[in-house]
Image (cartoon, rainbow, N blue to C red):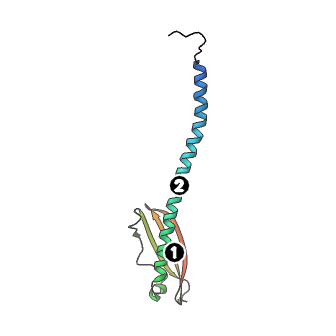
Amino acid sequence: MRLVSGQKGQTLLEVLIAIAILGMIAVPFLTALSTSSRALIIADERTTAESLVRSEIEYVKSCQYDNETAAGPSASYEHADVPSLDYPGYTVSVDVEALNDPDAGIQNITVTVKRDGEEVLTTSTYKSEHL
């Protein structure tokens, strides 16, 4: 191929330097993109777990206070280890425990959410017999 007078081509060295500069810019950008994608997945998982915990706590609090459950050292609620139909892969377990022995009318409710067997979130609250 002949060069027309006044035209200059690019040397191999110039092309290699341009590719190296592009690579130095692309690697951190792709790493940041990957990290932010993983953070988004974790945030979504936590939000779903918080929603499940809130729903389960409200359900337990709406049920009548059970002295039989409170009398034992620790008992699982009837919803224990129930897979969530709305959120596949998530399992919710609820433990109800009397705070004092004999029962003082206060129970500690612990809700644990797992996704594919791995714990995502555990939250505790209280339920009173008088409310």
Residue 45's disc number:
none
Task: Please state if 77 lies on the left or on the right of 7 as rendered.
Answer: left
Tell me residue 95's x, y (percent).
48, 76
User: Relative to 6, is 35 above or below?
Assistant: below
Residue drawn at (49%, 68%) of the image: 51
Q: Amino acid under label 2?
A: Leu
Q: Nearer the viewer, residue 55 or 1?
A: 1
Depth check: give the residue in front, 75 or 10: 10
Q: Nearer the viewer, residue 1 or 77?
A: 1
| Circle 2 residue | 40
Going by the image, does 7 lie left or right of 61?
right
x 49%, y 85%: residue? 70
Q: Which residue is mark 1?
A: 110
Badge count? 2
Q: Residues within 10 Å of mark 2 (few under 14, many from 20)?
A: few
Residue 31 in picture, x, y percent from top left: 56, 43
Above or below for 64 versus 36? below
Q: Residue at x 49, y 60 (%)?
A: 45
Residue 89 sits in quarter: bottom left
The amino acid type, in three-letter code, at marker 1 is Thr
Label 1: element kind: strand
